Amino acid sequence: MKINTERLILKKASWEEIQDAKIIRTRIIPSEYNEYLEPEMTLEDEKKWWDNIVCSNKAIIFSIFSKDEILLGFLKAFDIKNDICETGIEILNHENYSKGYGYEAFSIFLVFLKEKLNLKSSYVLIHPENKRSIKLFEKLGFVFIGIEKDIEFDYMSFYKMQMLF
């Protein structure tokens, strides 16, 4: 599946694109732009996750490419239950922040979730210090519904924001 927007190409992610992203991330100098990433998994654990979650359709991951086919990031839908799912976005390189790519890609992704998966709602979990993401999701129409503790990393809490379609 492939979706074209004015400036972007969205398509179901491949294992190779996930691995390309790891290479891109290693080139990024630690900064405010990537401090929200979870601890890195081993390649073996990551492949198990991919096979268990993505290949078994428990999650949907789209790659975001520019029209000139540069990998910009990913859109994610997971924990898909009944008519709701958790969603997220990752723009890989801070040089591509504040260019509207996230808004453009996620707007189309929400339409896909509503129309193709018949979902009625989506939520995101955002690190409270990640003001850029909070602003993006507010602009998309998500509303703050509370604070949620991370199940896996008990030292982390997230803003939970939700959108009804």
Image (cartoon, rainbow, N blue to C red):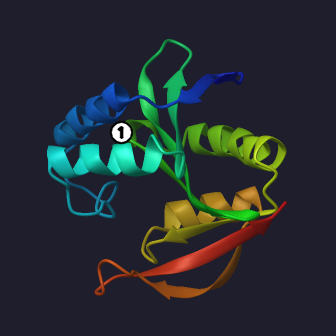
In the image, is residue 86 above or below residue 67?
A: below
Is 98 in front, or is 85? 85
The disc labelled 1 sits on which kind of residue? Answer: Asn
Q: Say which quarter of the image contains residue 8.
A: top right
- The 10 Å Cα crowd at callout 1, few under 14, some 14 to 19, many 20 or more, is some
Q: Is residue 115 above or below residue 122?
A: above
User: Residue 100 is drawn in which quadrant?
Assistant: top right
Q: Secondary structure at mark 1?
A: loop
Q: Residue at x 27, y 33 (%)?
A: 19
Residue 90: x percent and y percent? 45, 48
Image check: 88 left or right of 34? right
Q: Quadrant of the C terminus?
A: bottom right
Q: Position of residue 96 (x, y in %)?
A: 45, 36
Q: Is residue 127 above or below residue 151?
A: above
**Which residue is tagged 1?**
93
Where is residue 61 shown, x and y percent of the image? 51, 41
Q: Between 3 and 105, which is closer to the camera in this rendering?
A: 3
Q: Position of residue 97 (x, y in %)?
A: 47, 43
Residue 127, located in which quarter of the rendered image?
Answer: bottom left
Which residue is depicted at the point 67% across and 79% down?
144
- Relative to 4, is 15 on the left or the right? left
